Image (spheres, rainbow, N blue to C red):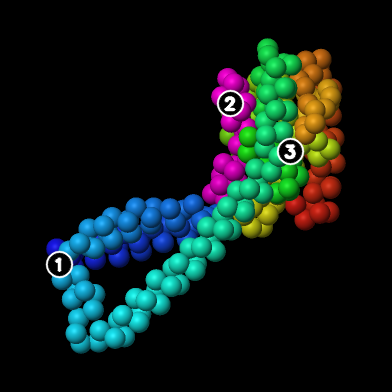
């Protein structure tokens, strides 16, 4: 039974490691190894003959050294990984209390409007979007999620037509965009790191206008007059896409 337990433990760890090697995986994908190893240790520790299983008399010295080296390496690597994870979480949630207060203030000022979290900039701005659940839990639709779009682009899938139609119809009445940043410009974390949002998505911003600012966000509100003027909007959208295509081609980004 103990040998079967060892085989199950090894197979479980190998399966987790293989799955955690997928593109885009992070430290969190190794978390399933924790219960696997805890259960293995809890079942095997009190078992009679454990030492004989791990360290039979023949070759006991080198096996003991190998296990000891593994444990030392695991403790060092685990400590470093834990420290890095804590620092990473701390940096990504920097000023989270103030940002949360800012978002709650916007929600209080616009109780009758649907509000969405916009994306822009680089990793220095992404921590603002980490607090988008505050909008969702307040009853606002989650129309766009940048990480999901990155995964979709990695799988060669474009943004759904239904999402584009919802954007064009003004389902989101107010977008929160990192202050001072160009709306909906975000590099994909997957190679070749092109822009997550297509020119078609950014052209829909012709239906929005900059209404004001908060401490951390620019407020882009739905402009009904621009949306109703179909001919003008269509012409402006073509011009916007052409201009955006020139800029992106010059910077190495592409749709």
Observer able to see residue 67: yes
Q: Position of residue 127 (x, y in %)?
A: 67, 42
Q: Which residues are magenta?
A: 132-157
Q: Residue under circle 3?
A: 184
Q: Residue at x 77, y 32 (%)?
A: 217
Q: Residue at x 73, y 28 (%)?
A: 102
Q: Position of residue 3 (x, y in %)?
A: 18, 68
Q: Nearer the viewer, mark 3 or mark 2?
A: 2
Q: Nearer the viewer, residue 188 or 236?
A: 188
Label 3 CA crowd tier, 10 Å (few <14, some 14–19, many 20+)? many
Nearer-N-terminus badge (3/2): 2
Mark pair 3, 1: CA separation: 62 Å
Identify the element where label 1 is drawn: loop
Q: Position of residue 175 (x, y in %)?
A: 72, 27
Q: Residue at x 62, y 26 (%)?
A: 135
Q: Residue 225, located in which quarter of the rendered image?
A: top right
Q: Residue under circle 1?
A: 48
| Marking on residue 178 | none
Q: Residue 196, located in which quarter of the rendered image?
A: top right
**Is 105 part of what is drawn in magenta?**
no
Image vertical order of residue 64 relative to residue 27, above or below: below
| Marking on residue 136 | 2
């Amino acid at each position: 039974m103990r040998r079967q337990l060892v085989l199950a433990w090894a197979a479980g760890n190998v399966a987790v490691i293989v799955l955690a090697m997928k593109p885009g995986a992070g430290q969190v994908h190794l978390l399933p190894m924790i219960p696997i190893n805890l259960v293995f240790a809890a079942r095997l520790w009190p078992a009679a003959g454990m030492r004989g299983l791990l360290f039979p008399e023949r070759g006991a010295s080198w096996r003991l050294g190998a296990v000891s080296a593994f444990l030392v390496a695991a403790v060092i690597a685990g400590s470093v990984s834990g420290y890095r994870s804590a620092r990473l979480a701390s940096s990504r949630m920097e000023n989270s209390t103030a940002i949360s207060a800012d978002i709650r203030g916007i929600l209080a000022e616009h109780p009758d409007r649907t509000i969405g979290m916009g994306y822009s900039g680089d990793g220095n701005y992404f921590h603002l979007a980490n607090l988008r659940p505050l909008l969702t839990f307040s009853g606002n639709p989650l129309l766009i999620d940048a990480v999901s779009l990155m995964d979709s682009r990695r799988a060669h899938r474009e943004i759904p037509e239904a999402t584009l139609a919802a954007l064009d119809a003004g389902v989101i009445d107010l977008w929160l965009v990192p202050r001072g940043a160009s709306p909906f410009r975000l590099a994909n974390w997957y190679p070749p790191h092109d822009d997550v949002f297509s020119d078609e998505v950014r052209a829909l911003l012709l239906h929005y206008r900059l209404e004001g600012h908060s401490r951390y966000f620019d407020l882009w509100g739905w402009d009904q007059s621009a949306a109703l003027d179909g001919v003008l909007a269509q012409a402006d959208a073509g011009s916007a896409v052409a201009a955006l295509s020139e800029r992106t081609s010059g910077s190495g980004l592409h749709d």
